[in-house]
Image (spheres, coloured by chain):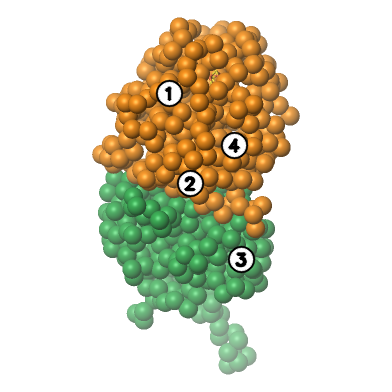
Amino acid sequence: MTKDILTIGGLELTSRLFTGTGKYRDDSLIPGVCEASGSQVITVALRRVDLESGTGNVMDFIPRHMRLLPNTSGARTADEAVRIARLARAMGCGDWIKIEVISDNRYLLPDGYETAKATEILANEGFVVLPYINPDLYVARSLVDAGAAAVMPLGAPIGTNRGIRTREMVRILIEEIDLPIVVDAGIGRPSEACEAMEMGADACLVNTAIATADDPAMMARAFGRAVRAGREAFLSGPGARAGMAVASSPLTGFLDAGTAA
Amino acid sequence: MSFYATCTEWMNAGLDERLAAMTETDVRRALGASNPGPLDLLAMLSPAATPHLETMARKASGLTLRHFGRTIHLFTPLYLSNFCTNHCVYCGFNSNNRIPRSQLTMEQVEAEARAIAATGLKNLLILTGDCRAKAGPDYLRDCVAVLRRHFPSVCIEIYAMEEAEYAALAAEGVDGMTMFQETYDEKLYPSLHPRGPKSDFRFRLDAPERACRAGMRVVNIGALLGLSDWRHDAFLTGLHAAWLMERHPEADIATSLPRMRPHVGAYQPATVVSDRDLVQVLLALRIFRPRLGITISTREAPAFRENLLPLGVTRMSAGVSTAVGGHAKSDGDGESVGQFEISDGRSVDEMCAVLRKHGYQPVFKDWEPIFADRGAA
Ligand code: SF4
């Protein structure tokens, strides 16, 4: 098998599991999670970063080889998200940014309109923008136009813990959007991450389920394996695939080959 | 719009009879509800729920973990002034009490800020009594300007203000407000607050709503449990929180669960809120609104606070002094009398060690002031 590479913003990734830094009982668990999961991308809420802190800073625990994906958690408007992104870059967190614009703390659903606005501004400033959205085809298309580097649809509203509830909507994005699709939020179990990958998602972001496990490193390893298993199932053939996305036509291709007439 | 209509409607809806009529089936239905309503909350606060605290605790613990993770946010109060024109019969700062009154100068505010910042804390709650002549909006603004140099998050727990006044403070970088209704029992309220601006029940009740409208990010409400029937007040606290959450989904709504403690002055609580009662309130509110922030204060004893950790608490104070200027002064020269006595006097370092021992990460910073600096851009 040729090497299965995921490319985002010019960066080649061999792991398709993104991890996070929130909700750990101790940030010192983070290096072990990165190692066990094999993850290469980790998200961190800029609002939590405290570079002046004398009492320990989450950044100190992120292994050097990880690609930092600062997020704009706490932003309620495009304007706030843009300002956080710029601050993140100024603080040395790099060019990647996960746009999270939420002005409804009750359901924590992202605001697609504000997200698209922020994406356009930041993409024009050279950021590698990964917007977090409801799996909505029109929003996703506007993000493609806005210059997003990937799209991160939610698998279920945050905290619902009932598996991938937006399955059909995510499937449509996988089929229709020519950007990497990273399923974010709502993945509570390795089997659900596996399911998302089987469907053809390009990657999964998992934080809470790992961070709140009794043994986060072991859970991280389980997620790493589940994501790989789902990916291999997806790559291995139509048996595991569903939906209409078939790039070539192995069964009816002969009709177009010219020799069939 | 005002929460007043909802409040009076429920207070006159025969709460005692409803509470007494709740059965185990009602409690079970409440625990199974995917979006619990007022009657579910009432069931969980009723005597019928008391035998099921362990079941409630399991559910509350799971919800807390899922929504907040293994983290506890730490903050500390800073008392700026204890001048007060009110007569709250249960309070040590009550203007009838002959205690030394003082108010921090800007130099003292700076000294307090440095002392607190040295502990690593990033989230500060500033408090005053109710005396606009001494600690008016201008004084507060000056204090906030000093404090914001040291703390990314500065919240207020002061007298009830007008919306424009809240907005002015928000523009200075105040990102949260706390307002205790003390009791939602409008009939009882006047006897507890006989004179002074705070005697206006309705103006106080609407203050959290005004703060939301003014753009405060965190709005924290609560009742002083024990002043009236704790079940009534806990119920109305939950309804008030839900009401605010519905109308202001952009704000983080939170609650504190203080109960009566001894203080200077002879007032004794109407009802005694036992540990078991307080746990029931905590669990019921967590299950009712899983994303509600919940604070347990240093009025509670250390061991009890620790036992509450997994049940739904999300914020705690540490390194607390309830006296004006109590942070920079060394212990022992306490001229100033505290507003109430604290049971948990542990330092920030001690609290952090305890939290880690219990498998929780103490979170100092959860806010980047860039969000609040809109006006400054
Ligand atoms: S509770 Fe507040 S308003 Fe009432 S007397 Fe005490 S300090 Fe003054």
User: What color does chain A have in the rendering?
Assistant: green
Q: Name the residue under label 2.
A: B151
The numbered dot on residue B140 is 4
Q: What residue type is labelled 2?
A: Phe
Helix, strand or loop under label 2? loop
Number of the front mark, 2 or 1 = 1
Q: Which amino acid does label 1 sit on?
A: Ser
Number of the front mark, 2 or 4 = 4
Whole-number angstrom distance, CA of label 2 to CA of label 1: 25 Å
Chain letter, disc 2 residue: B
In contact (CB < 8 Å): disc 3 and disc 2: no
Q: Residue at x 50, y 33 (%)?
A: B104
Q: Residue at x 58, y 13 (%)?
A: B87
Chain letter, disc 1 residue: B
Q: Is residue A16 visible?
A: no
Q: Mark 1 points at which residue?
A: B336
Helix, strand or loop under label 4? helix
Mark 2 C-beta closer than 8 Å to ligand 1? no
